[in-house]
Amino acid sequence: MLYPRAGVLFPGCLPEPGLAQDRNGKPPLISPVHTHLRVGSRGSKLALVQVEEVQSLLAGKGTNIPFDRKIYSTRGDENKAVSLTTSPADDFFTDTLDAALLTGDIDVAVHSAKDLPQTLRDGLAVFALTRSLDETDAFIGKTTFDRLSAGSKVATSSILRQQQVKALNPRIETVDIRGTIEERIQKMHDGCCDGLIVATAALKRLGLEKYIQSVMPWEAAPLQGQLAVAGRAGDTALRELFIPIDARRNYGRVFLVGAGPGDPGLITVKGVAALQSADCIFYDYLVPAQLLDHAPHAEKIYAGKRKGSHAMPQEELNRLIRQKAMAGKTVVRLKGGDPLVFGRGADEIEYLRRYHIETEVVPGISSAVGIPSRLGIPLTARGVAATVAFVSGYKHGEDEHRPAPLDIPRADTLVFLMGLTKLDQIVESLEASRRPKQTPVMVISKGTCPQEKIVSGTLADIQQRIKENPLEPPVLIVVGETLKFYREDRDTPRRTRILYTGTDPEQFRAYGEVIPFPMIEITPAKPTAGRIKTLLTNLSGYDIILFTSKFGVKYFFELLAREGYATKKLRPKIFVAIGQATAGALAKEGVSVALAASVETSEGLFQEMTEKLELRGRKILFPRSVLPNPYLKQKLTGQGARVDELTVYDNTPPAKRPLPVPEATIGQVVFTSPSTARNFLAAYGAIPRYWKISSRGAVTSAFLREAGYADFDELRNTH
């Protein structure tokens, strides 16, 4: 979500003149003659307190403007006999306020955010969601919740809360209740129930915390404890007034990224870009481990999601993704195949939308399409198959000991996912649908991966063939005549497999099948307070700022942001980058690069700097890693420059892990720095003799020679 720049249209709480009229031809909502806001709300004490809270939040951000309050009674207020468990209209608690906004009778409406409709009326928008005062639910009664006896009555207006109460204690009876907080408490005192479940934030806002006996352990309703300010979608000037109190401006984003069918090279370019931008990645067991190497600095959380073995329940996963995003993180939910094919992607999107968290889907190649295609098997072919159907072998909520019946679609080609344990049932169902026993069937294990295995047969013999040649999941089952296009003796030359030990494998894709396997881990350094103070004091005095990696750019600008340093002050500086990736990182920071070395080595960078820049007498700042590399400083100092180095990130060896593919399938290894070669040798002892070795830069080459490796290619430019 994009937000307009704050603080432009409201000097002294008044906008610039000349704003357009609203849809009813009325004057602008905030103008030189409108010095107050008409604010609508419901009439309960809680609703009025919430209006005061919004006004106070604005004042805390420097906007003091009078509120002219208008009270409205909604259908929810007038029809308290209607149970909320019957799913009343979406706008049950906002209808009259929505109408007042659309007719121009009020400027904005203040709601409990959880009362907002799932879909706002046309012409309306949420101007702000405040930070939650408290997300939890509370139990109030004569005792704590865990001490309630069997048969005790607990009242709540929400069917979800009733289910949650029953899940905690099935012996408790739940009853419906309606009314304001004060009315509900009075009903409890009058004996309608033994306790209530209510929003903790409501009790706090009303000063009724004394009634709280227990805080409930479950995740409460979306937007609980938050306030919402709604207005007309076209009132951009008024919307800007509320930006400073809108919690969403500090939210991060969530990307649902498809990892592809198994081969890490089959992820999309946009998927890689999302990974590289991620602060946190939640990944499934179907995700190739090499893809995580695109984000060496990101937090990585395993989410499991394998049939019969989930490392993390879906509800907990949703909550963690939300919490990371609300903390301002860029979150990637990395899922095998395509994120919206036979997965919980739709559930995750719907959940995040309820919290107004920006979510983007990056499609992936579904295994249902990608694996047959990789094998040269068309799912449709002229004169052979005109239709294809995709079938999940697993249904939600299914008992694995009593599998649900399979519905076989009518299609020429059938593709079954998650069907290995249901092969017998699939065959029986296909035979029952009158498929000929000689219909071709192929079962593919770990398709597109080095461990790929294939068992082919027909409906008549595929079960026996699988018994003789057991396969491991994940598998794909393809049924149909197009399988006859498959040729086991495909003679297409296989591309060289390149083990890439650096952090930017994309530039090597043209040379072969790149297997990312970084031998360094990147984390931010922690300069002392004194070093930071010295940097900020002296920063204006530097003529040139030099970067030799995108990580130097990332962590340098993050350091400045933490210290509140305005980066626009750096625009007059001369920025120098070692190559296009580093120059691109600077461009994302809004910086113009004076020189991006075409030869991406320290030697190449130094050569171009001497040819294109005046260095004598210049002060150069060099943000870099913790690892010493004296070459540039020595050479630049020799040209009469003064070079100050600043450590902004650490470069450490990763934990030893197995090679991502069998050693014998690798044809080439690329070392991008002395540390990548040093760390590889420390972990694995030696470089296999049959691997072609490529070294990037003279310093890396010198290390390899010292380590006893003389036969290698030196890469001077990867473009």
Image (cartoon, rainbow, N blue to C red):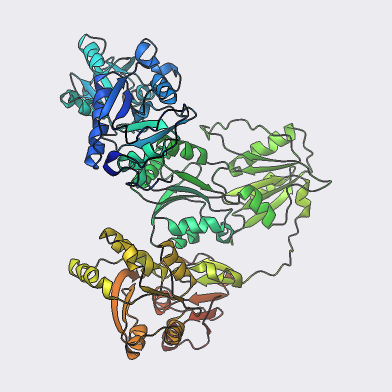
**Residue 103, image x, y percentages:** 43, 23
**Residue 320, image x, y percentages:** 37, 44
- The foreground one among 279 and 452 is 279
Query: What residue appears at the point 37 percent right and 40 percent down from the top-left corner?
Result: 17
Query: What residue appears at the point 62 percent right and 30 percent down from the top-left corner?
Result: 405
In the displayed orientation, state which residue is furthest to the right. Answer: 383
Can residue 200 be seen at all in this image of the molecule? Answer: no
- The foreground one among 124 and 456 is 124
Looking at the image, residue 411 lies above or below residue 618: above
Quarter of the image with the C terminus in it:
bottom right
Can residue 34 be seen at all in this image of the molecule? Answer: yes
**Residue 499, image x, y percentages:** 52, 71
All told, the count of numbered labels is: 0
Q: Is residue 573 left or right of residue 383?
A: left
Looking at the image, residue 582 lies above or below residue 43: below
**Residue 312, image x, y percentages:** 40, 43
In the displayed orientation, state which residue is furthest to the left. Answer: 210
Query: What residue appears at the point 26 percent right and 13 percent down from the top-left corner?
Result: 193
Q: Is residue 408 left or right of residue 96?
A: right
Q: Is residue 202 left or right of residue 418?
A: left
Quarter of the image with the N terminus in it:
top left
- The foreground one among 13 and 89 is 13
Query: Quadrant location of residue 137?
Result: top left
Looking at the image, residue 303 lies above or below residue 664: above
Query: What residue appears at the point 19 percent right and 25 percent down from the top-left corner?
Result: 213
- The foreground one among 127 and 521 is 127
